Structure formats: C-alpha cells, structure tokens
Image (cartoon, rainbow, N blue to C red):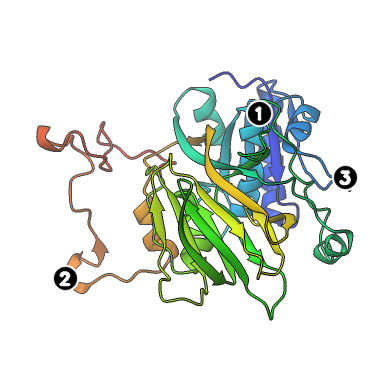
Amino acid sequence: MTVNRLGLVVHGGRGEAVEAARAVRVWCAEHAVPCTDIDVWHDHGRRNAQDEVEAAGGPDLIVTLGGDGTFLRGARLAAAADALVLGIDLGRVGFLTEVPAADVRSALDAVREDRLRIDSRMLLTLRASRRLELPEDLEAWARYGRGPLLPPPQVRPDCQVDVDWGIPLEVTALNDVVLEKLARDRQVSVGVYVSGRLLASYSADALLVATPTGSTAYSFAAGGPVVSPRAEALVFTPVAPHMTFNRSVVTAPDEPVGLRILERSGSAAVSIDGQLRGVLDPGDWIGVYAAPRRLRAVRLGPMDFYGRLRERMNLTDAPAAVADGSPAPLWSVTTPPPGDLAHLALLTVPDGSSSPIAQ
C-alpha cells in the first residue's frame, strides 16, 4: 500500500520505545513519508480522537511503540481516522502487539510493499440515558500522578438522539466497556438486559462487556472465557458478584447488552478500554453494542493466537505432547491442507518457508 502519512504513538517512558521510534522516523525520511508524533498528553490538553488525528494531518498508518496500553490508544486514533494500525511489541504479557521492535524496519517495508494482511477486529460503542460527565472532585482524584484524562465522549453526529433509545456517544472500545463501583464499601447494583430483555439483577464490584479481543484482558482476570479474536460475539462478565449465577454470558454480535443502575445502588464509573470516561447515578443506563466500523490492524504473518496464549500464560506442556524437547504442531505447517480441511483456519505457510517476521 502507499503510505501517505504516518502517525506515531510512543510510550515515552520506555527507552526501547523511544529508540524504535527513531528507527521509524529514519525510515520515513528515507521514503519521503511525513511522520507525526501523536500524544494525547504532550500539551496537557484533552482532545478527542478525531481532533488528535486531524492535528496529525490525517495519517493513513498509525504505528504504536509500547505494550497493549499504547496499542489501545493507537487503535482509538486509527478507528477515528479509518487508518491502519501497526503494533510494535515492547510489552510483557499483552496480546495485541505482534511485531518485535528489532523488526520495525522490515515491518514498514512489508506494509509499503503490500506484504501484509488486514486483521479486522470488532469494536464496541454505546448509547446512554444521558451524556457521560466526571464530577470535578472525582476528576482531580483520578488525575493524581498521571496526565490529563480523556474528555467525556461527544454525541455522534451521524446518529439520531432519541428519548427512548438514548444518546449515541462517540465511543470506541477495542477491549471492553466497564461499569464499576466508586466506593469500596458499596457494590454497584445493576439490571442487565440482553437484546432489551431483562436477564438478571447483579450486585457486584463491576460488570463489563468485552469484545473477543478484550476477552483476554479484564474479563479474563474476572474469570471470563478466552474467546478467539476471530470470533464475532460480545462477552458479558460480572466481577465479584454477590449471587449464585456468576457466569459470563456470550451473546451474538447483534445482541446488545444493557446495564441499568438500580435505585438501591451507589453511583458507578464508566471506563472504556481502561480509561475513566464518566460517572452515572441510579436510574441511568448504558447500552453496549458492536460498532458499525471495525479496527483494521496490520498483520505480517499468520495469527498464532493460541501460541501467544500459551506463551503469555506460561502453559506447560504435557510430557506426552512434546517430541525431542520441543512442542510440535498437530498438522503440517508447510503443506496445504487436504480438501476436507481446506475450509478451516489452520496455521500454514503455503510456500513452505517461514516469514522472518511471522509470529
């Protein structure tokens, strides 16, 4: 593809990220590609994603250098600009970034030469009974020791505001939308609806709706299922619920999940991909659903999600499954599958050789 302008999102607190960013800038200079750093905190301001990408000149490729948190920030920008996002891996336990920092130049060459795949990921958005806002005292507390918070979500201009259906908010979540308690001694009480019908009432520390991508984040820590990022689903997971039914619920992508704060509850915070974005009171509600747009992530090799799961979670090999001290794949990765398996997603390298940056 032709890269007309590149945007950089760098974890400035990590030396290896700063060094890798230099390599990206050198590559851009060599190929006459304008390169702009995008950082929501660099001028102590608070801007929404659209304003940030417009200030950066509208990049068509956004490169993130850091861990999953940095990638999430880049994904929010890429979704707003309908740009591609390429994650350079400098994290420790994440699932989102794929390309090692040492291969950053090779990765950019591969993108420029169209040796890439586009990984389409589900995003979440929401409607709410009212706009999200943060009380001043809570904002001051939440900002302690960190940069400015993201601004409250704007109203989506392309959607109708309706008293019955709520206010459509400019929200992009790659991992999850979370409704959580504010006071340690008081749980949040919430009525949970699926496709508009009441499922159950929960008293819990938090309730979250995750994408398949986000199933290995907060939802996983709360006991939720691991879902392939290639799946199409929403995952509802309660966190420390005080009730017998404490299981996750996996819904179809067109089945929205609604969360209404009950009158007996305290106020609740709304977090989007780990970022505090507003506070709701009893009687308020949010409806979380699959966004009409998708994230377009650059992938340069086969997606070995289960290999990454095994590595990140330190899953041990059963002795019987290991040959000569190394785990072998169950099926060939160098020859095409037979006809009856041709419709399955199997890790194969059709030309029989390994890509130097395949993960």
**As drawn, is 264 to the left or to the right of 124?**
right
Residue at image position (56%, 38%) is 86
Residue 249 rendering spot, x and y as whole percentages: 40, 58
Element carrying mark 2: helix
Give amino acid for label 3: Gly
Where, by quadrant of the figure, is residue 266 drawn?
bottom right
Label 2 vs label 3: CA separation? 57 Å
Residue 321, above or below 11: below
Circles 2 and 3 in contact, beta carbons < 8 Å: no
Residue at image position (36%, 40%) is 302
Which of the marked residues, 1 or 3, is nearer the chain's N terminus?
3
Residue 128 rendering spot, x and y as whole percentages: 66, 46
Q: Looking at the image, can residue 67 be seen?
A: no
Residue at the spot of label 3: 45
Element carrying mark 1: loop
Q: Looking at the image, can residue 279 be seen?
A: yes
Residue 150 rendering spot, x and y as whole percentages: 77, 48
Give amino acid for label 1: Gln
Residue 186 badge: none
**As drawn, is 288 to the left or to the right of 74?**
left
Label 1 vs label 3: CA separation? 29 Å
Residue at the spot of label 1: 160
Closer to the camera in the image, 30 or 58 = 58
Residue furthest toward the bottom? Answer: 185
Q: Nearer the viewer, mark 2 or mark 3?
A: 3
Mark 3 crowd level (few <14, some 14–19, many ≥20, 10 Å Cα): few
Residue at the spot of label 2: 320
